[in-house]
Structures are given as C-alpha cells and as structure tokens.
Amino acid sequence: MREALAALDLRMPHAAILDGELKDGIVTPVALRLLTSATPVIIHSGKMVPREILKEFPSIMTISEPLSPETVIN
C-alpha cells in the first residue's frame, strides 16, 4: 500500500484495477485517493469491498476472485 500511495504522488493513472487486500494492508486509502480524484476504479477481490469505500462510492465496480487476467480484460 505504501508503494501504491507513493506512486500516486508521482502520477495518477487513467484507471485502476485494485486487489481488495494488499500485503501491507487493505486497499482503502489507495482506492479513496483514486476515487476522489475521479479516477475509475475496479476492486478485484476474493473478500468483501471495504466498508469505507462502499459508504462513499456505493456504485463502485467489483470483480470477485479468482479470475484469469484475460477475463478481467474482457
């Protein structure tokens, strides 16, 4: 998560597909930062989307794991 937040300090992406849980924490801070800057986000997770994200962005797109990269792209 720290690396992702540091990367956002350098450059915002046009869109993002985020895993719901990163090795150093849940993805909430990264997702909220992207979403508040109007960056389209998809949460790809085997678990539930964090409540804080759903509260502020109830229509966020989610994809359940496991999926192949080809399926995500399609």
Image (cartoon, helix red, strand yellow):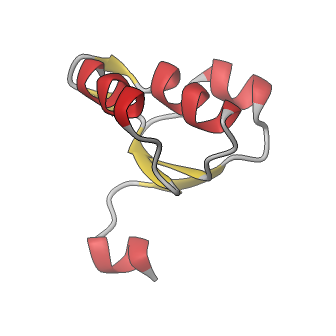
In the image, 63 versus 56, the foreground residue is: 56
Is residue 46 visible to us here? no
Going by the picture, which residue comes out furthest to the front? 10
Relative horizontal placement of residue 8, taking residue 43 as reference (left or right): left
Residue 20, percent from left and from top:
42, 35
- Res. 6 in view: yes
Q: Is residue 16 above or below residue 67?
A: above
Estimate the x, y position of residue 40 in percent, counting from the top left.
62, 53
Q: What residue lies at 41% left-to-right and 71% top-to-bottom?
A: 72
Quarter of the N terminus within the rendering: top left
User: Is residue 61 placed above or below 35 in the rendered structure?
Assistant: below
| Residue in view at x 56 percent, y 36 percent | 34
Locate residue 43, reporting x and y percent.
50, 46
Measured as percent of width and height from the top left, residue 58 is found at: 79, 38
For this rendering, which residue is in front, 39 or 26? 39
Res 54 → quadrant: top right
- Left or right, residue 6 beside residue 13: left
Q: Residue at x 31, y 32 (%)?
A: 7
Q: Identify the residue at horizontal 28%, vertical 71% (top origin).
A: 68
The image quadrant of residue 11 is top left
**What is the count of numbered marks?**
0
